[in-house]
Amino acid sequence: MLPADPADPEDFDVTPDAMDRGQRARLIRKTRTGLGLSQAEFASRFHVPVGTLRDWEQARATAPNFAIAYVRVIGQHPDIVAKAVA
């Protein structure tokens, strides 16, 4: 666990699971924004339910390992992936 900073009254403890979920959320969001796509555009282009994408990006749900692998491939080969799922 990452304990809260005692000098910061607004800080809070963070569990390892929450840190992992946050890192996954950041990867997904950075991949999508790096492609210049809105959540709706990304979801449509790569066949991911927009609500699921939103939950992953906002760290309300933890993206599973297969989804992280998929997002990494999308980040490197977006046109190939879009063509493959069309």
Image (cartoon, helix red, strand yellow):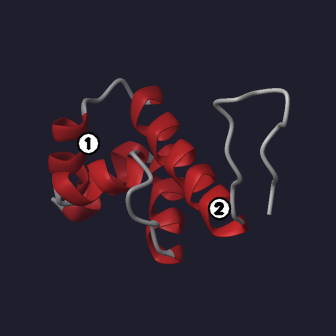
Q: Position of residue 64 (x, y in %)?
A: 47, 74
Q: Secondary structure at mark 1?
A: helix
Residue at point 81%, 55% (across, down): 2
- Gap between marks 1 and 2 measured at Cα: 22 Å
> In the image, 13: left or right of 29?
right
Residue closest to the eye, 30 or 85: 30
Q: Position of residue 8 (x, y in %)?
A: 76, 27
**Crowding near pointer 2: few (<14 within 10 Å), some, many (20+)?**
some
Q: In what quadrant of the picture does the C terminus appear?
A: bottom left
Q: Marks 1 and 2: CB-CB under 8 Å?
A: no
Residue at point 84%, 36% (across, down): 6
Q: Position of residue 42 (x, y in %)?
A: 26, 42
**Crowding near pointer 1: few (<14 within 10 Å), some, many (20+)?**
many
Label number found at residue 42: 1
Q: Is residue 76 visible?
A: no
Q: Position of residue 61 (x, y in %)?
A: 39, 64
Residue at point 35%, 44% (across, down): 79
> In the image, 85: left or right of 56?
left
Q: Is residue 85 visible?
A: yes
**Circle 2 sits on which residue?**
20
Q: Secondary structure at mark 2?
A: helix
Q: Image height check: is 8 above or below 23?
A: above
User: Hey, what amino acid is under mark 1?
Assistant: Phe
> In the image, 17: left or right of 76?
right
Residue at point 31%, 55% (across, down): 55
Q: Nearer the viewer, mark 1 or mark 2?
A: 2
